[in-house]
Image (tube, rainbow, N blue to C red):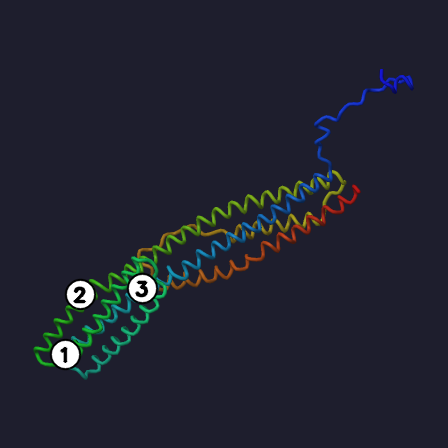
Amino acid sequence: MNGLTSMTGLELPEPTEPTSAHRFRLTTPVWLRTLATLAVLIAFLFAAVVSVSATDLRTHLRRAGGRAAPQALLATDLHTHLEVLDAALTAALDLDGRRNAPERRAALARFDGALARANAELQRLTAVTAGPAARRELDTVVRALTRYQTLAGQVIVLDGGSARQVRRAWDLRRTMSGLMRSGMLPAARRLADAGVRDLDRTDRERRDDATLARNAVVFLGAALLAVLGALQWTVARRHRRLISPPLVLGSLLAAALLVASAQMLHVPRYEPPDAVVSPTEMREKSFDMKEEIRALERWDVMPQVGAAVLAGLVLAGVRPRLAEFR
């Protein structure tokens, strides 16, 4: 019997300490604040992952478009110009004794044009070629082409002269053929192959990074939609409201961001390049990479803006409900 019983004559239960279940029970305001905070944090984490992933993809594309693809394209063009160069000189020297023949002049004109184009391609290759192995191949082409031009000048002067001069011209021509067939053409082909391999490796890395980022984005997006769903359920259950318009709009925005981000991070299944990549195919690939870079630049700001709008919608849906408890 306690003091209250003696005073009133009534049997009253002894006061007890609240149990741990009652002490730690989450009230509706706590649920609302917790879920709203979690939704906002996941939204901004989602935006950060998407922005960083887009930046990484642009880095891979710029490396491929700024070095690998141009090297493969320019080296392939150089190989073509060298073949034209050698064929034009052969055509000119095959017409002995007809120095002023229109065919010979046309062949020499083709030779001069191919030589100018080859030198131009070499200058552009110097700007994009990287790596010690590729640099060695480029030096091989430069040295051989310099020697080739010197010998070509001598051959053109000697051709059409005396029998001795003609024999000397053909001796020099054989030396030039060796420079072309054993030096310049193989080196140019190896340069093109190195560019294709670099492009191959960059494409693989881009696809691997995009796959990892896409998985993370899908996980975070699903978690965000689950939290928003739980928040909507809490509002509907505790406040007898079927839907909260701001939360419904936030869920739709989250779903749209998830779908768009997953599509942005989708890289087509990797297909190794053919043994020989044509210049047309390489130019098309370079153009496609530039278009992809421009498309990815939009993702620098869009995810953050979407996360900020979503956070505002979550707060707009939760604040009126919290105000009912004050």
Q: Quadrant of residue 148?
A: bottom left
Q: Amino acid at mark 2?
A: Gly
Residue identified by numbered label 1 = 158
Q: Amino acid at mark 3?
A: Ala
Task: In this rendered view, identify the residue nearer to me: 207 or 95.
Answer: 207
Q: Residues within 10 Å of mark 2 (few under 14, many from 20)?
A: some
Task: In this rendered view, identify the residue nearer to me: 279 or 78.
Answer: 78
The image shows residue 85 at horizontal and vertical percentages of: 24, 71
- Quarter placement of the N terminus: top right
How many badges with numbers are in the image? 3
Distance between mark 1 and mark 2 Cα atoms: 19 Å
Distance between mark 3 and mark 2 Cα atoms: 20 Å
Q: Residues within 10 Å of mark 1 (few under 14, many from 20)?
A: some
Q: Residue furthest bottom?
A: 100
Is 41 positioned to the left or the right of 6 in the image?
A: left
The image shows residue 287 at horizontal and vertical percentages of: 43, 63
- Quarter placement of the C terminus: top right
Name the disc covering residue 178, or none.
Answer: 2
Query: Which badge, 3 or 2, comes first in the chain's sequence?
Result: 3
Task: In this rendered view, identify the residue nearer to me: 232 or 322.
Answer: 322
Query: Which badge, 1 or 3, comes first in the chain's sequence?
Result: 3
Is 148 positioned to the left or the right of 56 in the image?
A: left
Residue identified by numbered label 3 = 75
